[in-house]
């Protein structure tokens, strides 16, 4: 389990947790290709040089945003939104009250102000009785799969559909919601479980800078300061437990995908996106 220690990080001024899902070994002796799928924290603070690098060098063409509608509206449009040729798709993994269309599908003249109690638009996540004893992070990840399976699949389909350039999937920190979607991408590509776990845990290397970055945003400051850094740090055992539960209940990540309508053909397309 050494491949994730290579320099897959994309060092940008405006992000802290951006890395390439390329360069990881697969069960059949292959390797995932660099420059196909990236994972990242929030892209709102990208600098002009960052944008030029992503567009010209990385050839970024798809942005898959996993934040809630409220997060997107509170943070505002990031600099990539002004770049022609980059498609933005939105798939919140948290349940929200009411029906929300893709917030990137319509260009409003002005972004509406959200009420002070915007966080209450997020529905309380019910925990299945048999999951009540799981660690909080594991319960959250299972919640994505229970309450927003269609958006997990939507994100994977958006990543699969990209051609001629790179896709980036991100949320706020790029560790939880992004970590679950990245897990499915790597599983479809044939990356062994231990490498998926190591990639998930790699965010721990940058957690101090990541928490500091989010704490500087009014949207996330309270959550960042309410808990200590250790509670925000992703741990290998968390992803390992999620994979174990998927194995036990669905025959693995690919079994979960198949059960939810993302079958062999779509899995092969996702695999090809990361493998060529």
Image (cartoon, helix red, strand yellow):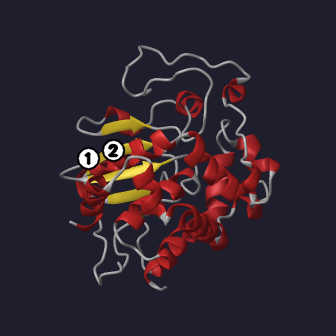
**Name of the residue lying farthest toward the left:** 164
> Which residue corresponds to mark 2?
158
Q: Where is residue 186 drawn, in percent x and y?
A: 40, 66
**Name of the residue lying farthest toward the top:** 109
- For this view, does 230 lie left or right of residue 274? right
Instruction: Pick whichever, 60 or 175, lies toward us.
Output: 175
CA gap, disc 2 and disc 1: 5 Å
Instruction: Pick whichever, 190 or 1, lies toward us.
Output: 190
Classed neighbour count for the residue bearing mark 2: other residues with Cα under 10 Å, few (<14), some (14–19), many (≥20): many
Q: Residue sitting at 44 percent across and 26 percent down?
A: 103
Q: Where is residue 169 drawn, in percent x and y?
A: 42, 50
Q: Residue sitting at 59 percent across and 40 percent down?
A: 147
Displayed quadrant of residue 96: top right
> Which residue corresponds to mark 1?
161
Instruction: Pick whichever, 150 or 209, lies toward us.
Output: 150
Q: Where is residue 239 drawn, in percent x and y?
A: 60, 67
Q: Secondary structure at mark 2?
A: helix
Contact (CB < 8 A) between labels 2 and 1? yes
Q: Secondary structure at mark 1?
A: helix
Residue 35 in view here: no
- For this view, does 225 lie left or right of residue 34? right
């Amino acid at each position: 389990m050494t491949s994730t220690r290579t320099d897959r990080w994309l060092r940008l001024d405006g992000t802290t947790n951006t890395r390439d899902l390329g360069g990881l070994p697969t069960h059949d002796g292959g390797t995932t290709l660099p420059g196909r799928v990236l994972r990242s924290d929030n892209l709102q603070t990208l600098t002009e040089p960052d944008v030029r690098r992503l567009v010209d060098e990385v050839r970024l063409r798809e942005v898959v945003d996993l934040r809630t509608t409220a997060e997107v509206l509170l943070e505002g449009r990031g600099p990539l939104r002004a770049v022609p040729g980059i498609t933005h798709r939105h798939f919140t993994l948290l349940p929200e009250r009411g029906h929300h269309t893709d917030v990137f599908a319509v260009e409003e003249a002005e972004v509406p102000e959200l009420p002070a109690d915007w966080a209450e638009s997020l529905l309380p996540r019910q925990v299945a009785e048999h999951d009540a004893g799981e660690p909080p992070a594991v319960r959250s990840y299972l919640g994505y799969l229970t309450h927003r399976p269609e958006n997990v699949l939507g994100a994977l389909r958006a990543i699969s559909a990209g051609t001629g350039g790179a896709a980036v999937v991100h949320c706020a920190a790029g560790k939880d919601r992004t970590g679950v979607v990245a897990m499915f991408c790597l599983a479809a590509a044939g990356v062994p479980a231990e490498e998926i776990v190591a990639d998930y845990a790699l965010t721990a290397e940058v957690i101090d800078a990541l928490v500091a970055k989010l704490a500087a945003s009014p949207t996330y400051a309270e959550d960042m300061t309410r808990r200590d850094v250790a509670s925000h740090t992703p741990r290998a055992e968390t992803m390992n437990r999620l994979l174990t539960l998927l194995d036990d209940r669905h025959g693995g990540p690919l079994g979960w995908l198949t059960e939810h309508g993302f079958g062999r053909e779509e899995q092969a397309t996702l695999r090809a996106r990361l493998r060529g």
